[in-house]
Amino acid sequence: MRTYHASDSLSSSFRDFHGDDKGPRFRFRLIVTVVLVLAAFGVLFARFFWLQILRHDYYSTRAEDNRITLVPIVPSRGTIADRNGIVLARNYSAFTLEIDPERAGNIDETIDELAELIEITDQDRRRFKKLQGEAKNFESLQLRSRLRDEEVAIIAVNRYRLPGVEIRARLFREYPLGSLAVHALGYIGREREADRAWIEERDPGGEQIGNYRGTRHIGQNGLERHYEFQLHGKAGHEELEVDRFGRAVRRLSIVPPVQGATLTLTLDVRLQEVAERAFADRRGALVAIDPSTGGILALVSMPTYDPNLFVDGIRSEEWDALNNDPDLPMYNRAIQSAYPPGSTFKPFMALAALETGKRTPQQAISDPGYFEFGGNRFRDDKAGGHGSVDMHKSIVQSCDTYYYQLANDMGIDAIANFMRPLGFGQKTGIDLENENEGVLPSPEWKKKRFRKPEQQKWFAGETISIGIGQGYNSYTPLQLALATATIANNGVMFRPHLVRYITDSRTGARTMIEPQPVRALPLKPGNIEVIRRAMVEVNKTGTGARAFAGVPYTVAGKTGTAQVYSLRGSAYSANRVKEHLRDHALYIAFAPAEDPKIALAVLVENGGFGAQSAAPIVRMVLDHYLLGQTASGPAPEDPGAVDSDAPAETGEENAPALELPAEDEASSPVEPVETASP
């Protein structure tokens, strides 16, 4: 019998392992398995290295972002005050009714319960729904603003059954003087998509975009719009820890906001008040300028509106009333409307004649009461004419025939080249939005204005009416005031501006808006003096004499009447014409004439003669500014004023003149009276 030992069994197994043909496959599998395990551990290690070492900062920040969120804190808007410190726009605190969607449960039911306690309008509900779509989870949303004390008390008593309902104190914009100076101030309103686009356009570097997180109101017009970035301030933020549902758990830190800057204006609000009162219910505009700085002392557009209506979203019925008002109260006539200047253009034409050598002060014409050109008769306002007329008399008595002939002698190119540096037909650069550049007629302008070749030709007869401030002439009251101020300042023009200085809310440092000379026209002092003397005489013995009888200061001025509608073969009579087709009344002036402190232009839409309705307004304004006298009522019209400014009929075909002719209309050799008023 054979005996087996354990060592024999092991030796046999070893031999089987090495000698069996299955051995190599096992070894291969073992090696592959080891390699795969090592590769897997290598990939895992590499991933850990990538995440924990190379991308540590990135993912750490992402994790913090999931745990921490920044809630913007909207800054308090800067105030606006006039030159004497009278506040025109400010902020005030009021209670708002807000709902936290995370704690309120069924929001619609909550709002219905609130509606049983206080007034909740459909507009409030729509606004809340819109806010819901834009809000984050941790934000409470405003349902009602500016709660009355009794409404606050009612909500407070019932809060125990209104989870998620809160009463908070918020800041609101207020215009304490209501509609006064609204076209200069503008207003703020709820932010729209167009406002975001405006911010991006004005801020290509993107510095302001983040500053507007959480902002729901923005300047919509006037200074509130133009100085939006300065008034808005710098947003702050709260750092909140949130749970995985985005709900706030606790506050970690806070960076307070910085209040917006304060604007101090050149505007004199008391003068503004006098000017607006002088207009009463008449439509029109007034611009008063300090000739030596370009600072706007008063900027009036009538009628006005209350900017407080827009602060928290205007009601639809109020918006419809404003938008459908035929008097266009929201239209800034001072800078957006353009009108023919009428006879107020004549002093500038006379100065052009002196500077170009086309006339001397003593050179006179014989006025038969008309000027004939190309078979057409351009009539003067005075039948039989003014007799022998030199430059002084042409301004004082406002002789049309003198300027018909002068315009023909000068030619359109010389007129346009002289008027352009005075600011006619171009934006002044005032710190307001949507300024109209007006129309300074020239052959080049006409080629750009009209499409068809036959319309683009400039006819010599069109130049005639340009001389008396009619035809294609179309300028804003601001442009007319600026040109007047330039003459008053001996040819030195300053950029018109409304802001005097900006005060930093943190440091109190003032940034002055320095007067910016636009240009110094090379006008001869003797020529300016000729025009000045004639304009002074206008208010002594000429067309403005009745309005300025007895004034203790000297006023250089010029009345004007701009025709709106042409009546063929008939003398103009306001009683036979619809109110909106009656002549516009204008007046330009500066005073004291020997050392001007104020220059201004006034336009009364469909007001008739310049001496009748515009000059009395100027008298009230100057009396207040120079003498401190304040009238209690509006400026009275002077029905006895003699009209020497009304443009007489040319005898041409009747043509309405409410706006420039359409591009597909043929132009006529003699241009009808026109205006680009609203």
Image (cartoon, rainbow, N blue to C red):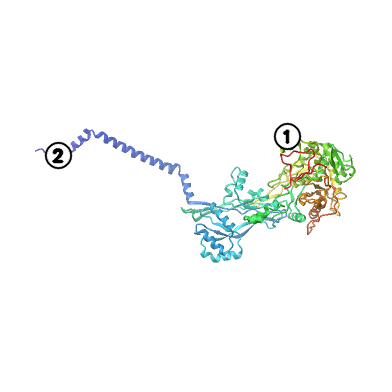
The residue carrying mark 2 is: 5
Q: Which dot marks residue 453?
A: 1
Q: How crowded is the residue under tag 1: few (<14 C-alpha within 10 Å), some, or many (20+)?
A: few
Q: Which amino acid type is shown beneath numbered disc 2?
A: His
The foreground one among 651 and 631 is 651
The foreground one among 160 and 319 is 319
Q: How many marks?
A: 2
Q: Position of residue 95 (x, y in %)?
A: 59, 61
Q: Which amino acid type is shown beneath numbered disc 1?
A: Pro
The image quarter containing residue 86 is: bottom right
The foreground one among 629 and 572 is 572
The foreground one among 521 and 175 is 175
Picture quarter with the N terminus = top left
Q: Is residue 89 above or below residue 386?
A: below
Q: Give the structural element (helix, strand or loop) at label 2.
A: loop
Q: Position of residue 503 (x, y in %)?
A: 66, 51
- Left or right of 91? Residue 553 is right
